[in-house]
């Protein structure tokens, strides 16, 4: 088994959709980023890459490469899942914490779990999505940013 941790933070700006976990949630601002700025999927991708010792998301999808401008982070995560499968690993489980003042994550938790499970090719019982606020402190607490932490467990695929 291998454990990986990922973290991502994006500033929130006007005139961008709020992308999180492969979904668009209602909010008046969205994450700035070279891609769609989905902090949850970026944190999960980094956790997967780290657990597999395959570098980080920036090495695979650099913001200097125009191919990734405006990219759907679900597509980026699909590339990462294929890479870890290519080296004989599979997702055991994922635990994600979203840190944001708004929007409230509770009403979307099940949909986020379902979508992330689909992207990771696992049963939803293997995915946890939790939410915290920053209690009004710092950029996140002022509602200016969203951050996510992700921990994943990878298992080696054993030939039958």
Image (cartoon, grey):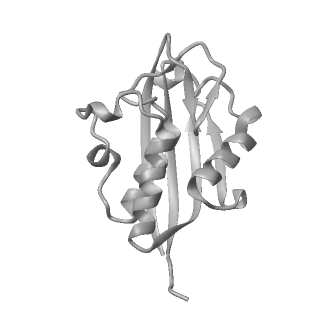
Determine the residue positioned at 43% across, 39% down: 8
Q: How many marks?
A: 0
Q: Is residue 44 above or below residue 98?
A: below
In the image: residue 10, left or right of residue 117: left
| Rendering coords of residue 32 (x, y %) | 42, 22
Front position in the image: 49 or 118: 118
Determine the residue positioned at 40% across, 31% down: 35
In the image: residue 9, left or right of residue 116: left
Front position in the image: 104 or 119: 119
Is residue 148 shown to the viewer in this render? no
Image quadrant of residue 2?
bottom left
Image quadrant of residue 132?
top right
Determine the residue positioned at 32% across, 51% down: 56
Determine the residue positioned at 52% across, 40% down: 40
Among all residues in the image, which is located at the extreme bottom?
160
Q: In what quadrant of the picture does the C terminus appear?
A: bottom right
Among all residues in the image, which is located at the extreme left?
64
| Rendering coords of residue 88 (x, y %) | 43, 74
Image quadrant of residue 10?
top left
Is residue 125 shown to the viewer in this render? yes
| Rendering coords of residue 12 (x, y %) | 47, 19
């Amino acid at each position: 088994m291998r454990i990986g941790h990922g973290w991502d933070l994006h500033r929130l700006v006007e005139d961008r959709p709020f992308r999180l976990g492969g979904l668009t949630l209602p909010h008046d601002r969205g994450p700035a980023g070279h891609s769609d700025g989905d902090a949850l999927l970026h944190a999960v991708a980094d956790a997967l890459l780290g657990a597999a010792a395959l570098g980080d998301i920036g090495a695979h999808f650099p913001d200097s490469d125009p191919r990734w401008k405006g990219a759907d982070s679900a597509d980026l995560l699909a590339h990462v899942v294929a890479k870890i499968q290519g080296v004989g690993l599979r997702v055991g489980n994922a635990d994600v914490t979203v840190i944001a003042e708004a929007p409230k994550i509770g009403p979307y938790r099940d949909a986020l779990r379902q979508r992330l499970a689909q992207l990771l090719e696992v049963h939803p019982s293997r995915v946890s999505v939790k939410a915290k606020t920053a209690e009004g402190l710092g950029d996140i607490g002022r509602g200016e940013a969203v951050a996510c932490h992700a921990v994943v467990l990878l298992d080696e695929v054993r030939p039958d």
